[in-house]
Amino acid sequence: MADYIEVRGVKIGAGIPKICVPVVGTTEAEIKAAAEAAEAVKPDVVEWRADWFLDVEDEDKVCAVLKELRKILGEIPLLFTFRTKGEGGERALDKEAYVRLNQRAAESGLVDLIDAELFTGEDTLKELVVCAHAAGVKVIASNHDFKKTPEQEVITERLLRMKALGADIPKIAVMPEKKADVLTLLLATVKAKEEISGPIITMSMAGTGLISRISGEAFGSALTFGTAGKASAPGQMDAKELRQVLTLLHENMA
Ligand SMILES: O=C1C[C@@](O)(C(=O)O)C[C@@H](O)[C@@H]1O
């Protein structure tokens, strides 16, 4: 089994860690402007954080935005993410609406990946995986803790569980309360990678955790988020600078 996932020719999990630029905006105009700024830095992946969009509950409007994003992004892979309030997002959505929205995005033919949160429920995650895969879309399962860093075993177990439930790429973002928490996240990453074939994505947030956003190649995180404008989580670096740092590390690690 390949150790990477390929989307539009981008091999997530092979070679240098890939860069994903988040697009956040409340209106279609803001979202388009953010997507243009993202496209300009030529990231490997663009994430649309749809939870910021004021009309996100109108699925037709969401699809209209997706069409515009696809035009702007050309062949850059697009990740559709509705981040729920409980995991650091902008708004809450009931489970049915969350599932419907993600299904609609997956079936639109306009996105390459969807983000599905582990804690919306295991059956829900499985259901979204089946639906996305039927539409040829990959699934990043995710979990976020904006308050603390769980124990290493807990982080590793969550990543393994996401994979066991069918996710193509397990992802976890945690908040460090102290320096040692960053080491906990990194060790959890190494342990998970020993057991999981295929890419995983991990990060420790904020300034204290920044090192984890640039050290993916050393410890096993396949993708990192960088900005071209507004950040979608604390600790994200400018995408262009991030590319320089990742390249420098990659060249010297080879
Ligand atoms: O899951 C993630 C990771 C993230 O929270 C970060 O810390 O970079 C940013 C989010 O936009 C994305 O959906």
Image: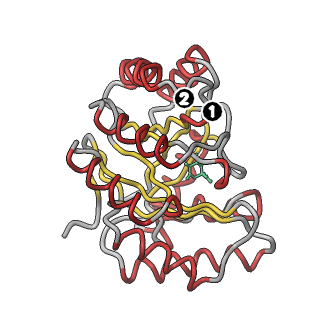
Q: Quadrant of residue 31?
A: top right
Q: Which residue is mark 1?
A: 52
Q: Position of residue 210 (x, y in %)?
A: 68, 59
Which of the 4 image quarters holds residue 181? bottom right
Residue at left offset 64%, top offset 24%: 26
Q: Is residue 253 visible?
A: yes
Vertical order, 141 against 62 (above or below): below
Residue 67, x across and y down, in percent: 37, 20
Q: CA distance from mark 1 to mark 2?
A: 8 Å
In front of the other: 133 or 43:
133
Amino acid, disc 1: Trp
Is 168 or 100 nearer to us in this picture?
100
Element under disc 2: loop
Looking at the image, residue 183 sits to the left or right of residue 130; the answer is right
- Which is nearer the eye, 114 or 247? 114
Q: Nearer the viewer, mark 1 or mark 2?
A: 2
Q: Quadrant of the N terminus?
A: bottom left
Q: Residue at x 37, y 35 (%)?
A: 105
Residue sitting at 39 percent across and 83 percent down? Answer: 194
Quarter holding the C terminus is: bottom left
Residue located beneath label 2 in the image: 56
Tag 1–tag 2 contact (CB < 8 Å): yes
